Each structure stands twice: as C-alpha cells, then as structure tokens.
Image (cartoon, grey):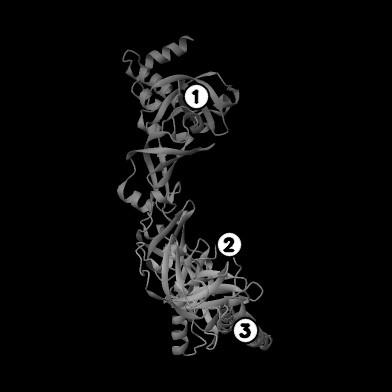
Amino acid sequence: MIEANNKVQDILDGYLEEEDFGQLLEAFDKTKEEAVTEGVIVEIKNDDVYVDIGKKSEGILPLNEIQNDKADLLFKVGDNIKVAIVGYSNGRSLLSHKKALRKEKVIEFIKNYKEDPENSFEVKVIGKNKGGLIVVDENDVEFFLPKSQYGFKESNNIIGKNFKVKIVKIDKDEQSIVVSRKRILDDERKKRKELINSVSQEEGVIEGIVKKITTYGMFIDVGGIDGLVHYSEISYKGPVNPSLLYKEGDKVPVKVINYNKERKHLSLSIKAALPDPWSEIKDSLEVGDTIKVIVSNIEPYGAFVDLGNDIEGFLHISEISWDKNIKNPKDYIKKGQEIDVEVIEINSNERRLRVSLRNLLAKPFDEFAKNHKVGDIIEGEVTQTTTFGAFVKLGFIEGLLHNEDASWHRSDKCKDKFKSGDKIKVKIIKIDAEGQRISLSVKELSESPVQEYAKSHKVGDIIKGQIRDIKDFGVFVELSKNVDALIHKEDISTSMLENLKINDEIEAVIVFIDEKKNRIRLSVKSLAKMKEREVLNEINDNDKITLGDIIKDQLAE
C-alpha cells in the first residue's frame, strides 16, 4: 500500500515537472511583454502617469504606484523609472513600477537560490489570472501558484490570504518561479502516515505535549500527530477531570493503546505509561493497616479518599461513624481533609480498596459506659417505637425502653406515648457490657403507685381488695388504682382458692412491700394465724378467768 502511494506521488511530481510547466508559465505571465525596461515620466495627469518607453505612444502607469503611504509622489516629470509591461489598452501599454521591482527581485532570488526540497515559506495572494494566483513573500518576491497546486478550494476573497508554499520549479530564462501549496499538504500527509505507522507500532513509553483539554479527555501531540487520551485513561483512580490535573503545554508520558485505521484515530494512555500502583500495594498493604488519606470527593453514599499514589479508596457512609443514623457524610468529614483510616478490604484484581474511619474511633458503648452509670438520668431522642418498647438515641448509641419501664400504668405502651424525634428524660437501669445493651426507664423518674400506697400502709396491715385475676400460681388483688397485690397459692387454702371468682372481695394481710419494683404480697393464711393469736392473746390477757371457771362452765353445760 505504501509503495503504491509513493508511485502515485512520483507520477504526480513528474506530471508537474514535465507536462504542465510550460503551459503554467504561459498562463502566469507573458515574459517578453513583461520585460523590465526603463522609461521617462512625461506627464502626470489625474490618476495616470504617462511614461515614454520608446514606443509609438506613451505607456500608462497608475498614480498610486509612485506614491508612498502618505500619498506623496516618489517621482516627478522627467524622472527615469523602471517599469514592466503588464498589458495593453486602446493601443497603449499598461505599465507597473511595482511589477518591475518584483521582477528584479525575482531575478535576484533566482540568482541566489539554493535548492532545498524541504524548505517552505509563507506567501500572500496579491492577484490572480485564469491560470492561478500571483503571490509574494515577505521580501515582495513574486511567485506563481497554479490552480492544480492550490491544495485548497479557491474562494472569492482569496486576495490578501496567507499560506505556506514550496518551490516546485524555477525557470531562469523566463525569470519565473512556480510554487505549490499542494506539495506541502502531500508531504505532510506522507509524513503523517509514516509517523502514525511508526507511533502506532510503538510499544514503549513516548513523550507527548498536551495540545487541547476537553471534558472527555485530552489531545496529545506526539511528534506532530494528535492522539486522544480518554479521561478514563489518565489515572488509575478511574475517570477524572483532566483540567484539574493538567494544562495545555504540559509534557506527559503516554503509551499507544489503539489505532483505528479507518477513522485514523490514535488512542493513547497516560496511566498505561506509569507503574501500576495496585501491583505495588498488593505486597505492601494489608487488611487492618492504618493509613493516612485525603478526602478527595464526597457523595451521599460515602466518600472517596486519595492514598497519594494514584489510588483511591472508598469510605462507605456506614464506615464513617458509629452513629447508625448518619444522614450526610459532609456532617462528619470535609473535602481535602486528611484523616487516618483502617484498611478493611483490598482487591488488587478488581482494583477495589475499602477503608473505615469508625474502626479507629472509640466505640460509643465503651465511651458511654465509661462516662455513665446505673441510676444516671439523661436526655435522649426516640428513634423508633415497637410493640415491645422504644429505642432511644443517647449520643452515638441507643438504649431500649421496654413498655413495662415506660409507665407505672399497666396499660400504657411506648407506641402510644412517644413518636420518633421526641426528646425524653430517661433513667439508666442496666448497662450490659457483654451484650452491649443499655436498659432505660421513664417510670422510675416518678414515685410508683406502691410507694404512694406504702405511705399509708405497712407490712402486717389487714386490708381488703377486689380479685382482678386468678392464675395457676396465685391471685391478683386490686387494692387501689394501679396498685395490685399478689397472693401466692401457698398463702391461701386450696378450698378457698377453688371457690374464688374475679371481682370477689377478699381479706388478707400485707406480708411484703417492694417500693422499687412496685410489688406487694398478701397472705390469707397469715391473716388466719394472726386472728388465732389474737384470740389466744385475749384469753391469756384476761386475769379474771381461771382454770376452775372454765371447768365450771363446762360442767354447767
């Protein structure tokens, strides 16, 4: 394929040199007519200058050709002036002083010209004819650019345009120089193709220069051709914003990863040109290690942290704090903040690293147990109510408030008394270090019904109550509102127990009062014994009665 293209180029070159050149020069200028000659200015009238060049009639030269930028005349009548014949009109020769000067410069240029196929230079279009364009260089040397050598589509406003050309032919006899824009483009395409073939086959690391940065990556100049580094090929961290890392003009190492011949698309990679950091940490980092990182990005579900070696780890929201109700990571960490974290997972094959911040923080339960004790009264926030109680947030931990500890009233339930978000005062009634549990109470913040009852009753008092419930283990007796007492089955006769019904009134004696646990125990059997003792005491305390009296009473009967 390369040989075929080279042959085509050789044919085109030969065609330009052999077949076209004579015709193109003829289209360019009529050398004999445009020969430089010297004349004498004989008259200046309006915008025309009449010059005697030794012919039947004077030639006409435009006035502006002998004026400077300030419109001052550079010549006067009688002065000799160099001119070139550029055409004819109404039997008069049309002259150009500037053309004559350029012609002299062309002659000088040809005289000093040293052939250099690689040399190119910039020209400006100053005129056109049916064969092509008249162009001049920075020294006002005139060249001819044939249409076949444009290398671009001619526009109506071509006059004044600048572009680079190469010299393709010089004719000393005709004092003409032909240039080509197409030759430069052909050479550039050829070089680009050779360069692309060379670069695309390059397996090592090459140096490039950042040419343009976009949202999807960067265009890198590698020896004159541009390749694209996609934003996913910049860093081992994953897709990144290239403008945060590089600027135009930066030198970067790159590696060719693909070349699409059909699209002529060269794909490059920066990260492929760098050592793989995942291979390095595989043997240097272990689960459980503590490392310093920088918070690089924060999302609602967690944060990404930079290890400083082109690797990012992930800090899940659940690993930021011991607080189970964390809503936003930004409440705990900030972008750019340096933090210590613990490595909890490394997977080099899948390029995944997970870390934890909370593992390095003191456990909330241990901190709580260190600063609080059973009996402390603190304020908490209800986070959830259930059928069995409510969970109350105490800093970074939660305690449980059972229904039975929520109120002294038997029918009260937490779900009826509280809702999520309520601030309540609670009393710590148990700290279970082994089970990591805190038990709370609200009812113990006020006197129990039994405490109130105990102010007017004591052990040994004989009371009456109404049977509220009968169980296998005993009978519950309601003494007053929210005050129940229990008669164990061993404290009542079997025959009496069998005949009792709910709502029956029963009399018994108080045998036990537990104000803290809100409990009272009664006994019917103890009441019977007390009554027996009372009878005996009455008998023993009556001094008037004697044994004889008792015998007499019995005989009288």
Q: Is residue 283 visible?
A: no
The residue tagged 2 is 156
Instruction: Give the answer, above or below, for where 376 lies relative to 143.
Output: above
Residue type at the position of mark 2: Asn
Residue 121: x %, y % from top left: 47, 78
Mark 1 crowd level (few <14, some 14–19, many ≥20, 10 Å Cα): many
The residue tagged 3 is 21
Instruction: Give the answer, above or below, for where 452 lies relative to 239.
Output: above
Q: Which mark is residue 477?
A: 1
Q: Nearer the viewer, residue 194 or 272?
A: 194
Q: Which mark is residue 557?
A: none
Residue 450: x %, y % from top left: 39, 27
Q: Nearer the viewer, residue 127 or 357?
A: 127
Question: CA separation, marks 1 and 3?
Answer: 130 Å
Residue 275: x %, y % from top left: 46, 78
Instruction: Give the answer, above or below, for where 63 lies relative to 530.
Output: below
For the point 39% across and 44% down, the residue is 430
Residue type at the position of mark 1: Val
What is the secondary structure assignment of the residue under circle 3? helix
Residue 505: x %, y % from top left: 52, 18
What is the secondary structure assignment of the residue under circle 1? strand
